[in-house]
Amino acid sequence: MNKCMTSISISNFTLATMLNVLSIAIASLVIFTLGVACAGQRKRLDVVEKLNGPVTVPYFLPWFGSFFAFNQDPLKFFKLCHQRYGKIYKVLLAGKKIVVVAHPDGITSLNRDTNKNLTNSAVFAIMMRGISNFNPSNVDYIHQVMDQRIFPITKRTLSPALMGQVTQSVEGSLRKELLALCSGEPRSPRRLKLPELIGRPLYISNCAALFGFRYPSLNTFSDFELLDSGLPQILTRLPFVARRSLDARGRLLSVLMEYISSWWESDGVEDIPGASTLVMESLKEMKVSKLSKRDAAGVLLLFLWGFHSNMWYMLFWLVTHLIMDEESMGRLVDEVDACARTDAPVHDGKKALSLLESAISETLRWATTSSTVRFAEEDTEIIVDGSVVVINKGEYVVGDIRAAHHDRSIFEHPEEFILDRYLVKDDSKTVLPRPMVWGAGKHVCAGRHVAVHLMRRFMVECLSMYDIKAANSGPGGKKLPRISAKSFIGSLKPNDEVHVTITARKV
């Protein structure tokens, strides 16, 4: 990195001070605005409109609508609206009209979109700019290349038939990374932050499988953490709050440009050593499509974020729930040990590791946030609870998956994590719906098979190697970390650090 002169450092300090003052001023304005809104709305809160179907959540300020309440805590906002307005309602957020669907069959109808009038292009463009900082003038073309050329490669190479190249590489690297955690004193307990047990080994292993040894995964993990943690602020266009995350994004893009530079400049004479088929075929398509090296690096960053982020946090919550409940941890360890003794295939989770399979499904149910978003390019309709709901051209539609996953009419004690919730009981006549995390139809997640396989593999390796316990539960006993108020992308994020102690097992 370039050295900074003293004058530049002073300028940066002054700028940082100005931004802090500006953020305080904006926060004060928001508080004042909300206070005025509440005062003005007190007599109107019970008045909602029924125009063309869904009720509209009342708001005080034109254009802004409910933006401030949403931005303060998206999960709480959706939960309160769901409780008050039911399983379908409409909100105005910063000029955008959004229909929110919280009914399972409504979300299914949204995903299937039989009329073909609901697209994810506008939403995906926002994610593309947030994660990879593409030039707005290039976004439509990059999305076209990804949709028509890159996604077919992704679906093929990550399919159950061909995903072995990636998963086997991850598994080999993952085992080494996990073993290295206690290589110095194998029988002595070691205290770790949970991301050191889960996030770092997974990130290094995933990068090795995707990019090969030339990508400096060890040196980029902290920047990936920064980008991922600041993504909600980046997407809501609050750059003064997300400055560190924006800087981390820039460094990651620079590393990826350097990673592909020699291959790109030589017109791809030889493959990058160790790079996956997914990465190499995608790079070749991007080169043929005349994307710039900078934009190609941005697409690779999208790959990395999509491959790693949600899987990492799902495993975080699974391990966190297990260390809070020693009985559940013991049951799962017993199943893993029994599987090892019988040489049952680890990949066949439904038969050999049915409790682990249930635990993964329960984690996906418990920790998934709203993730299905579409834009109506024409007037269209969806079916919600047996009724036709009109979606007007120009409106967004959000599937509130978290609300569907916490529906008390479907799930008993939905707020609780129940390890064996998805185990099929012999006397049970009802089968719980599977978590609605992968989408459906054209937009189904191409990496879903890889994600579940690697979650299963991580848990088997980790529980086979180590006894894992919560470190210092504190005077109040063991408590789950608080959930971040900004968790509205993919999966829940913790607001507190979780520490564990790991001890090598005598197996």
Image (cartoon, helix red, strand yellow):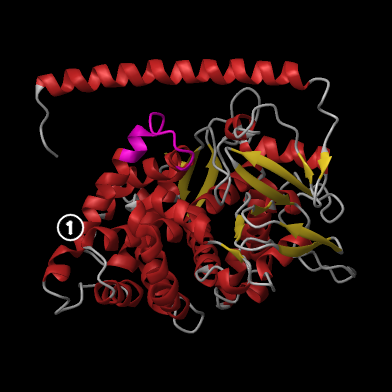
Label 1: state its secondary structure: helix
Viewer can see residue 205: no
What is the crowding at mark 1: few (fewer than 14 residues within 10 Å), some, or many (at least 20)? Answer: some
Give the amino acid type for the residue marked by disc 1 in the picture: Glu
**Where is residue 457 drawn, in percent x and y?**
50, 66
* Residue located 62% across and 49% down the image: 369
Q: Give, as a single range, the part of the protein colored magenta.
A: 235-246
* Residue 268 among those drawn in magenta: no
**Where is residue 66 drawn, in percent x and y?**
65, 33
Quarter residue 173 falls in: bottom left
Quarter residue 172 falls in: bottom left
312 or 374, which is in the foreground?
374
**103 left or right of 451 in image:** right
When the figure is inspected, residue 335 is found, relative to residue 320, above or below; the finding is: below
Viewer can see residue 23: yes
* Residue located 46% across and 15% down the image: 25
Query: What residue sits right under mark 1 in the picture?
Result: 258
Quadrant housing the N terminus: top left
